[in-house]
Structures are given as C-alpha cells and as structure tokens.
Image (tube, helix red, strand yellow):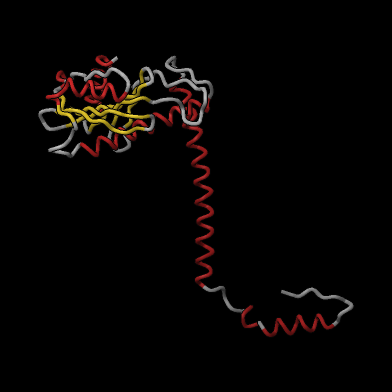
Amino acid sequence: MTLPTNPTHPDDAALDAALRGLHRNVLDEPVPAALLEAARQVDALQKQSALHRRSAAMAASVLLAFGVGWFGHGYLQPQGSADAVAMAGTANEFVRQAGFAHTVYLPEKRHPVEVAAAEQDHLVQWLSKRLGKPLKIPQLGAQGFELVGGRLLPGDSGARAQFMFQNSQGQRVTLYLGALGKVSGQSATPDIQATQFRFEPDGPVPSFYWAEQGFGYALSGQVDKATLMALSKLVYAQIN
C-alpha cells in the first residue's frame, strides 16, 4: 500500500518508501493457510445462508399453494391466503403432536393408557367433559382392532384426548383428537370446520388427518396405508 503524498510535503514519498522497505518481508509472505481456511469457511457459510433463504422462500410458496388448494374445495373458505397458510400450519402441528403422542405411549406394556377399556363409560364421560364436546369411541373390530383405553393430553388449544386400539398381532393405532381453535395471531378468522382426509407419511409415525366442526382428528400407526385409511373411514363414519 502506498501512502498518499502531498506535493507540499516532499518528505511523504521518502516516508512511504521507508515504511514499505521496513515491512517488505511481510508483504511478500504468502497468505497463512489458517487465514485462507477461515476465508473459505466464511464464503461457504454465506453461500449456505443464501441457499437456506431461497429454500425457505420456495417452501413458503409451496405451502401457500397447498393451503389454498386444500381449503378451497368447498370444505373451508378462508378469508385470505395468509389464513390458508396459517391453517395448514395448524394442521401440520396437530398431526406432529399426534405422532409424538403415539410414539411416546406405543411401547408401554403396563401403562399404555390412563383409563382401560373395561371402564369405557367412565373414559367417555371424563374426556367429553375435559374436551367440552360429547365424544364417541369408534368400534374398529371389523378391522381387527379392539380398544385398549384412552388418556388425557395437553394441546395448543386446550385438552386433547388419545384412544388406543390394538389387534391380535400386537399392532397399535391411536386416535388423537381435540379442538383446533382459531388461527394463531388472527382476531376474527373462522375456525377450521372441515377438511378432506390427508395422509401424512412422514413425521414421527404415518397418520391420516381430518377436521370436522372445529375438531381435529389424527389416526396414527405403523400399519400399511390401506389399513390406516380403512380404519380412518370407520372412525369418521362413527364419530360424525
């Protein structure tokens, strides 16, 4: 680097030359490897950050399109695209919570439920009171699944319930249900009233989700899609 000179100060040129001579050994040295690696990492992080921003923008656009399509088939007419996206997010979170609840209690041998099937009447009355809605326990014997029992769980909009069923091979499925409430952050948007069946193969466990009269339902289990769909149709037919 050459220091700026001033024509009225001829000594500046001499000072510049002296400084360059003093530090010439440093100027001629190669850039340290550690510094090069640090620069490479910073460049990689900047590129990764830019990629994440682009991916997030693409995901938001896909979610917007999905939400509008899903809720626009005569099942629900949201006030705007923002509501559709928020409602789709609410459904995603509901299914995720249902999946986690399933995986937590699935392996339990002695305490898979709070109230066993032998006390079914008490179970229905108790959970109906806590969820503020008359509940029905579906009969899934036609598909080989019998009630194990149920339990009370917490949810974003209040209490949630879980009913567990098991077949003769020891396979278990759980029905998770509860109020969805209004879209978060909105003051006057409608409750989610009804949706089509939606299959969620990812997440903690495969699930079929739907909503009816402001309540969400998710049937989850490590069974094949056809079996889970047949069970979901039985549940829907009996509780609505």
Residue 146 shows in the view:
no
Q: Residue furthest left?
A: 168
In the depicted structure, whether residue 194 falls above or below residue 89: above
Query: Horizontal placement of 49 versus 93: left or right?
Result: right
Q: Nearer the viewer, residue 171 or 114?
A: 114
| Total numbered badges shown on the rendered structure | 0
For the point 62% across and 80% down, the residue is 26
- One can see residue 24 in this view: yes
The picture quadrant where one finds residue 8 is bottom right
Q: Residue at x 49, y 46 (%)?
A: 52
Q: Quadrant of the C terminus?
A: top left
Q: Quadrant of residue 168?
A: top left
Name the side, left or right, on which 225 lies relative to 169.
Answer: right
Q: Position of residue 12 (x, y in %)?
A: 81, 80
Please name the residue shown 52% across and 44% down the image.
53
Please state which of residues 202 and 100 is positioned toward the viewer in this rendering: 100
* Residue at far right of view: 8
52 w.r.t. 23: above or below: above
Q: Which is more toward the observer, 185 or 66?
A: 185
Residue 15, percent from left and from top: 77, 83
Q: Position of residue 111 (x, y in %)?
A: 16, 37
The image quadrant of residue 178 is: top left
Q: The N terminus appears in which quarter of the rendering?
A: bottom right
